[in-house]
Every structure is written in structure tokens, then in C-alpha cells.
Amino acid sequence: MSVQLALRNIRKSFSNKLGSVDVLGGLTFDIHERDFVSIIGPSGCGKTTVFNVIAGLLEADSGDIVYRGQAVNGLRGKVGYMMQRDLLLPWRTVLQNVLIGPELSNMPAAQSHEMAMEYLNTYGLAGFENAYPRMLSGGMRQRVALIRTLINDPDIILLDEPFSALDYQTRLYLEGVLMEAVETFHKTVVLVTHDIDEAVALSKRVVVLGGRPSQVKKIYDIDIAARSPIGARSDPNFAGYFHALCGELDIQTEVRAA
Amino acid sequence: MTQSVSIDKSAAARRAPRARSRRLVLDSGWGRSLLQLAAVLAFFALWEGAARLGWVSNFLVGSPAKILDALIRDIRSHQLFVDTGYTLFEAILGFVFGTAVGSACGLALWYSPFVARLIEPFIVAINSVPKIAFAPIVILWFGTGLISKVALAISLTAIVALIAAYEAAKDADPDLQALLVTLGADKNDVFMKVVVPFTLPYVISTFRINVGFGLVGAVVGEFISSEKGLGHMIFTASSLYDLNTVWAGLFVLMAIGFVLYFLIDLVERKLLPWRQASNTSTLKV
């Protein structure tokens, strides 16, 4: 499989009055075409920093980002970014929120409008196009955010714990919606999560970060045939990966007397 | 959504029908207006009674009946319309220009945190002078006519608008800005599509304060030097110890402020439809 995006020895540190903190200590990994990669790691390991570097919101101190064979500074305008907060603009209606991307790329209004309505229909939001975000439920808002991401036709979709604020049922449903969209539109996805269960169920590969400053500890290829969120969690291989990754993160659930 | 709300209402009605209906009488639009009207009438009746019975000095507090006489006199002579129109025009001009220029400058400071930090102490310095103290200079510079009152009103309103707009623009959600950048937005796009709409509610909330300041500027300017306007009317009447005419002018000013306040309410509703679009009922504590 060909490499779409390669990170080579990415370093990043943040400095403040108290001194500087090294967050990324030379990350190297590849993302393939049509890949679904999850990045997991203990909290504070710089998952979101990796994202911001890929998205072009932050510049790495050193290292290279190679996109389809060309060195780039980040993928501004080529990525779709979804966060835990849906980041819908509260002063725009659902339709206007979806159309923000086409608006920025100066797509003809008639064409983008038609596309937007098609998406809204597909994702069960027909009839809500003129509603304001605050009138919608969390799941609906996140679906609007997904459409806003997809309509821009990004090469890579970056997901930063997009479903972690939702209840489990809504979350499973949206995971399904996401998987289907990714298959239909042939997208590459990078998912940052602290949820091992979600990482195993959705991903083709899982990158484990660890250490301070963080480095790639291990990369797992997830061999689960089922592509639905519930199917994947029922797969016989699921438990094995789950165990292995919990071990990687050194998660302990037993309470011991100190 | 409407369905769930109506179910909610009927459930509440079943639980406590009596308490609900009692609250409805007093808290409905008509009930409230009636209460408010009664309070106003009682106030004026008490005043008039006190003045007639000699409880208070007619000379120092006037009386509602004589205030009405003064109003009717000035309406008949058309002087009231001239004065009101003059003051209203000054106040609105000052409010519109001051708020527009102030908000625009405050928003523009978002573009350069460096410039903003550089001029911050100067803004604070200007803001800490009571703007009314500029009045004599403003009269000297701009004369005794309309311009000086408008200038005074602008000096009062512009700083308020500038500070409010700048503070709000500075707080514009950084995540929303980042999202737009990932979608390929440049700085102007971020400004127009995030910063300005984010700041708008704060700017509009300064309208309420600034309408009042616009009137302050106009009236104080007229106090100092003028031939027309409600401030002029109040000032000359008070120097003649004609308290009833003074009150008449004050009540007209109050009426103007009242009307402008509700006009701004209307503007706010038109400009911020998304703020009204809520179906959450208010929490009863």
C-alpha cells in the first residue's frame, strides 16, 4: 500500500516563563492511502499537538512532513478537522454551517447548495437546514460537523476525540455513520482518542505513543474483518487487541493499598 | 420539539392547576401592564395630592397638573417639537457615529495585538477622564450649534463601543478560528466569518448604554451653550425657578430614552435571530 502522508522525526516543544517542555520527541510514522489510523497514548502525550502539526495550525520545530512524495509545511485546506466540540458557528443555520467550506473555496453557490441538501438528506437532517445549532441535540450537531467536513472533500480527515462527549448509543451510531462515509468517499482518517475500545473497533492500524517527550512506542495492525462498530467489537480478535493496548498504556484498574 | 413542550405544559397543568392559573393572571402581559400602570397613576396621584394639601412645597417640587399645563403650553407653541427634535437629532447622530466608529476601531484592533497593546494605556487614559469635562473645549472648537453637541455625544459613546468591541473580539473562540484556518481561511475570512459575528452581540449590548450617553452628550452640550433643545429648555426654565417646565423637559427626555431603548430591542432581535432560537424554558429556582 502506498504512503499518503509520512511524518519524519517530528519534534515540537512549548516554552513558557517556567522553561520549555518537549512534547514530541521525534515522531516517525506513515499513513497509507485510505488508511484508518488511530493515535492513542496517555493523556498529555501530545496527541493533539501531532494533529495541529499535520493540520498546519502549528509548525514543528524540526522534522519533515511528506505528502504524496512532496515535503510540505502542513496540510492547511487539505484536511477536515473534527473535534470533541462540534464547533458549529452558533450564528449560522445548519445549512450555512455546512456551506462554510465551499464558501471559503468560492464554490458556485447553486452547486454547493445542492450538494449540501443532498448530504443533509443522507444523514437524516432534512427539515433542519434552517435550524440554529443550539436547537439540535449533541448527536445531530456532530452529524452536521461531519457533513461540514465531508462536503469539502478533504484528502485526510483528522478526528480529535470527536465522539467522546456523546452518550454510548449515539456514539456507536455516529461511529457507524463515520465508517460508512469513509468507505463511500474513500477517505483517509487519522483518529486521536484515549478510548482503546473505539481505536480497535474503527482502525486498520493503531499508533501507540509513549514516553516524555513522546515517541512512537509501537504500531499495531488491526486484523478485524467486520467494518461496523458493533460487529468489530464482537469479533474474536477484538479482546486480544484490547488487552494488548491496555498493556501498552499500562492501565491499571485494580485499586491497591498504597 | 413543539410536541414535547406541549406535553410538558399539560403535565405541569395537571400537577398544579390552581397555582398555575393564579400566576398566569399576574404574570401575563396584560396583568403586568395593569400593575405597572397602577403604580404610575398612584405615584402621580400621591404627588398631586401632596402638592395641593401643602405637604410639599409647590415651588420646589411642582405638581403633575401644572407639569401637564407646561407641556400643553409648549405643544401649542410648537416649541416642544422644535426642542425635542433638536435634542433627538443630536443624540441619534452622536450615538450612531460614535458607536459605529468606536466599534469599527475596536474590531480593527483584533488584527494587530501589537498595536492594541501599544495604544491600550492611551485608551485607558482617555477613558478615565470624565468625558463631560471636555464639554467647554468642545463648545469652543465646534461652536454653539448642532455640531458641538454631536461631538460631545460621540466622545461619550465611541470609547464605550471601542472597549467593548475590542474586548469581545479578543475573546473570539480560538477553536472556531482554528477550524476556519484548517478549511483554508485567511485572516480576513476569520475576521469576517468568526470575529465580527462573535463580537456583534457585545457591540449591540453597548447600544443600550450608548443611547443613554448620546442623550447625555446632547443635553449637557445644550446646558453649556445653546438656543434650542430640551437641555436648553430645562436649563432656562430652572434659572427662572419654573420647576414644572423643568419636569416637563425631563419627562420628555425619559420618553425619548424609553422609545430608543425599545427600538434597540427591535434591532437586536433582527440582527441576532440565533440568540432567540432557543426552546429551553427559564429555570425556576
Image: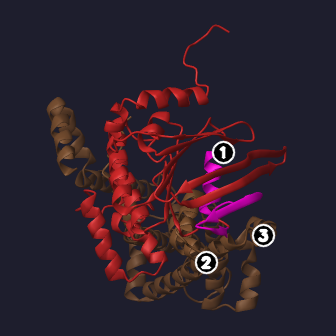
Q: Point out residue A21 in the picture as x, y percentages from the top left corner.
A: 79, 44
From the image, tell me which residue sits under label 3.
Answer: B114
Provide the chain ID for the residue under circle 1.
A
For mark 3, does the 10 Å Cα neighbourhood hold few (<14), some (14 to 19), or many (20 or more) residues? few
Q: Secondary structure at mark 1?
A: loop
Name the side, left or right, on which B18 lies relative to A155.
left
Q: Position of residue A153 (x, y in %)?
A: 43, 68
Q: Which chain is brown?
A: B
Q: Quadrant of residue B255?
A: bottom left
Mark 2 and mark 3: span between their CA atoms?
17 Å
> Mark 1 is on which residue type?
Gly
User: For numbered disc 2, what is the local secondary structure?
Assistant: helix
- Of tags 1 and 3, which is closer to the observer? 1
Residue A203 versus residue B250 in the image, above or below? above
Chain A painted colour: red
Rendering colour mode: by chain
Residue at x 42% of width, y 43% of height: A202
Q: Which amino acid, mark 2?
A: Ala
Q: Which residue is mark 1?
A: A46
Mark 2 or 3, closer to the camera: 3
